[in-house]
Image (cartoon, helix red, strand yellow):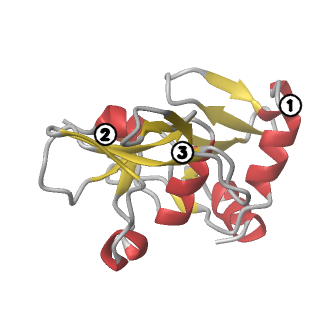
């Protein structure tokens, strides 16, 4: 949903969120303002936001949803998101995983400063004109797989989570 639609729901008493959020926003009728209930359980008036750009970009999203006990950690649920969001988060330095992956404690993250030794024992810096010196690394119980490629199932899945939530 877009913000205009979700704002109407907030005014009716709904708690709302973006897919990856652990917390939610709600309308406070007494304060006549949007309150932000954070993933840490704190409540802030939207007018107190310290990162106006981040808050404004959230408002511009078309992925708003009603927060409930299934999709919101602060209400007892779990936040999940799409593969496109997962890519955004790994570019920001976060670790993400699929709930649907069989192995425990598996995740992907962005790797930098990639190098290797060739047969002559020379260290080669893996610099690429288009992407620089980075790749997606899959970290699993058997080690690290550099240059991980997502399957179609991974790309279409909506069960991505932050790796801290994977047991």
Of the pair 166 and 105, the residue shown nearer to us: 105
Disc 3 to disc 1, how far (Cα)? 29 Å
Reading the image, the residue beneath label 3 is: 90
Q: Secondary structure at mark 1?
A: helix
Please tell me whether residue 47 is drawn above or below residue 75 in the rendered image. Answer: above
Position of residue 112 measured from the top left corner of the image (x, y, whole percent): 56, 36
- The image position of residue 86, as x and y in percent, is 50, 54
Quadrant assignment, res 87: bottom right
Q: Disc 3 or disc 2, which is closer to the eye?
A: 3
- The C terminus: image quadrant: top left
Frontmost residue, 121 versus 140: 121
Circles 3 and 2: CB atoms closer than 8 Å: no
- Residue 155 vs 106, above or below: the answer is below
| Neighbourhood count class around disc 3 (C-alpha, 10 Å): few under 14, some 14–19, many 20 upward | some
**Residue at image coords 36%, 79%:** 152
Residue under label 2: 76
* Depicted 94 relative to depicted 77: above or below: above
On the image, which quarter does residue 32 sit in? Answer: top right
The percent position of residue 110, horizontal first and vertical second, equals 51, 42
Q: Please name which of the two marks, 3 or 1, marks the residue nearer to the observer.
A: 3
Q: Which mark is residue 47?
A: 1
**Mark 3 or mark 2: which comes first in sequence?**
2
Tell me which numbered mark, 2 or 1, is placed earlier along the sequence. Answer: 1
């Amino acid at each position: 949903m877009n913000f205009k639609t979700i704002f109407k729901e907030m005014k009716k008493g709904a708690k709302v969120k973006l897919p990856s959020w652990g917390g939610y926003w709600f309308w406070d009728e007494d304060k006549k303002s949007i309150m932000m209930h954070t993933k840490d359980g704190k409540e802030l008036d939207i007018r107190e936001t310290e990162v106006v750009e981040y808050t404004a970009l959230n408002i511009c999203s078309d992925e708003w949803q009603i927060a409930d006990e299934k999709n919101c950690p602060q209400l007892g649920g779990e936040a999940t998101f799409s593969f496109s969001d997962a890519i955004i988060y790994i570019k920001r330095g976060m670790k993400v995983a699929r709930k649907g992956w069989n192995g425990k404690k598996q995740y992907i993250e962005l790797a930098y400063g990639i190098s290797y030794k060739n047969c002559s024992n020379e260290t080669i810096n893996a610099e690429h004109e288009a992407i620089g010196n980075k790749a997606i690394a899959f970290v699993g119980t058997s080690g690290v797989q550099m240059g991980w490629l997502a399957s179609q199932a991974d790309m279409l899945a909506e069960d991505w989570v932050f790796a801290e939530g994977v047991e």
